Image: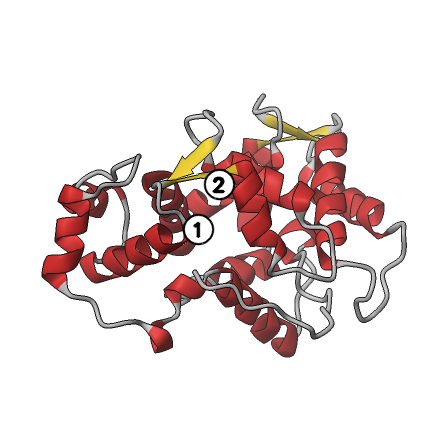
Amino acid sequence: MKVNSRDESLNTSGECDLLTGNSPSGQSKKNMKQRFLKLLPCCHVDSTPTVRKDSIEEDFELATVCCRPDSLEKMLEQTKFTKTELQILYRSFKNECPTGLVNEETFKLIYSNFFPQGDSSAYAHFLFEAFDKHKNGAVNFEDFVVGLSIILRGTVTDRLCWAFSLYDLNKDGCVTKEEMNDIMKSIYDLMGKYTYPCMKDSAPTEHVESFFQKMDRNNDGVVTMEEFLESCQKDEAIMESMQMLDHVI
């Protein structure tokens, strides 16, 4: 999980396809996938380090960190990663988090290095909450790898449910305009003010309105899980954006 800072400007096209259903161009699809890969540098197959089987398995069973991961066999059952992929992910996670845990402050610090031109703190908070399944203020390797498995290897429904959970900030089973506005504002803050094309101040609100026009089927002011799944699965552009994650690792 080595951090590589970026100086290039960020193009916003294609960033919000799941939210708006707008079809991204071929170039923006490529850019989106490249950005996702940069957020998961430990998953780069072209820079995969040599892994000694005995060494990794010993780490799983004899780890001296504060939080020991479950056995490799158990995580093979919990995720859709291969044994080698889990070994590489664990090595990278342990290098960044020697204690076996990452708290929100550290998570935000790591995440901020990927978006030096913007303020990623709010979005990193929402993302951390999504990974922190035990709600104890810390993400361990199991939390991380199970969430990553859903995002990268889960079914379309699995991925959409995970996304809905991210948007449903208070976890009451529905997404309000206020919640979606907080999410969209955090995304625009993360990307910074020096994007091309230049973003209008009203852009987050416009995206929220577009989201609700597509998703809020009964016009009651909230989007339920059922409405979200039904709308997304009928939207070709959203399905294409979901499929872009199929071959990240």
Q: Quadrant of the C terminus?
A: bottom left
Point out the image quarter for the N terminus: bottom left
Q: Outermost residue, top direction?
A: 172
Q: Is residue 234 visible?
A: no
Q: Are marks 1 and 2 in contact (CB under 8 Å)?
A: yes
Q: Label 1 belongs to which residue?
A: 151
Q: Quadrant of residue 141?
A: top left
Name the residue rendered at 69%, 73% in the picture: 7
- What is the tally of numbered marks visible in this picture? 2
Which residue, as the protein is rendered here, is positioned at the far left?
54
Q: Nearer the viewer, residue 79 or 235?
A: 79
Q: Residue at x 83, y 48 (%)?
A: 206
* SS assignment at label 2: helix
Real-space Cα separation, disc 1 to disc 2, in angstroms: 7 Å
Q: Residue at x 82, y 66 (%)?
A: 194
Q: Which badge, 1 or 2, is on the more N-terminal residue? A: 1
Question: Helix or strand or loop: what does disc 1 sit on?
Answer: helix
The amino acid beneath tag 2 is: Trp
Q: Is residue 109 left or right of residue 48?
A: right
Q: Residues within 10 Å of mark 1 (few under 14, many from 20)?
A: many
Colouring scheme, one of rainbow, by chain, secondary structure, one colour: secondary structure
Q: Residues within 10 Å of mark 2 (few under 14, many from 20)?
A: some
Instruction: Please identify the residue farthest to the right as the structure is shown.
Output: 201
Q: Badge 2 is on which residue?
A: 162
Q: Residue 19 at what x, y percent from top left?
A: 66, 50
